[in-house]
Image (cartoon, rainbow, N blue to C red):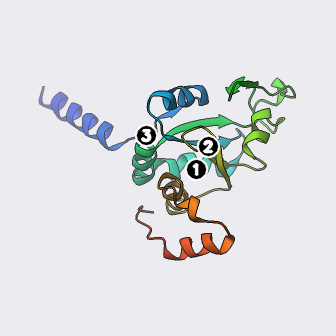
Amino acid sequence: MKTFFIAFTMLFALNITAQEINWMSLEEALEAQKTAPKKIFIDAYTVWCGPCKMLDRNTFKNEDVVKYINKNYYAVKFNAQGDEEVTYKGKTYSNPGYDPAKAKTRNANHQLSRVFGIRAFPTLVFLDEQSNVLAPIVGYKDAQGLELYLKMFAQNDHKDMKTQEDFNAYYENFKFQFKK
């Protein structure tokens, strides 16, 4: 009985500390926005993309990243070369060029990829509270690299940036707080 109690306590403690991002579909995020407006964070990935897998394995397991995304965003996983139909802003998008024989390799890009400005993988897409695209951010980001963008969009600091110099100044003055 004592062994069972110790094992149960350890398992419970692991569950508390091992938080994960609350991923949902785009449709679920758009529906949630209707009752509780929040920005949407989209991880546009492909099944063959090494840096996409690194994001999952490293950045999206970082405790600070998990907490910040869950608090400030609706998080969406989007297979940018997948075959699912997705409705966004009243229009349904699909992947007419999808080849099931290439399901685990490079495939045709989903139509929604063009709408979101996705040209490479991974791309992290930020949508505002009205589900308008704020920006696609291309490439792998570690926890602190992602922190910059998560906070910039969540706090609407991007609205003050009109030029590359504005962004550079923001970056130079940014106080990183996420643990690596």
User: Foreground residue, 30 or 54?
Assistant: 30
Residue depicted at 61% across the width and 72% down the height? 166
User: Foreground residue, 40 or 49?
Assistant: 40
For label 3, the residue is: 20
Residue depicted at 65% across the width and 75% down the height? 165
The tag earlier along the polypeptide, 2 or 1, is 2
Q: Amino acid at mark 2?
A: Asp
* Helix, strand or loop under label 1: helix
Q: CA distance from mark 2 to mark 1?
A: 9 Å
The tag earlier along the polypeptide, 2 or 3, is 3
**Label drawn at residue 43:** 2
Q: CA distance from mark 1 to mark 3?
A: 13 Å
Q: Nearer the viewer, mark 2 or mark 1?
A: 2
Asked if labels 1 and 2 touch by Cβ distance under 8 angstroms, the answer is yes
In the rendered view, does 114 fall on the left or right side of 130?
Answer: right
Q: Amino acid at mark 3?
A: Glu
Residue 31: horizontal and vertical position, in percent? 53, 25
Residue 131: horizontal and vertical position, in percent? 60, 38
For label 1, the residue is: 55
* Helix, strand or loop under label 2: strand
Residue depicted at 82% across the width and 31% down the height? 102
Q: Amino acid at mark 1?
A: Leu
In the rendered view, does 164 fall on the left or right side of 72?
Answer: right
In the rendered view, does 119 fall on the left or right side of 138?
Answer: right
Q: Nearer the viewer, mark 2 or mark 3?
A: 2
User: Foreground residue, 140 or 34?
Assistant: 34
Which quadrant of the figure has residue 100? top right
Residue 44: horizontal and vertical position, in percent? 66, 42
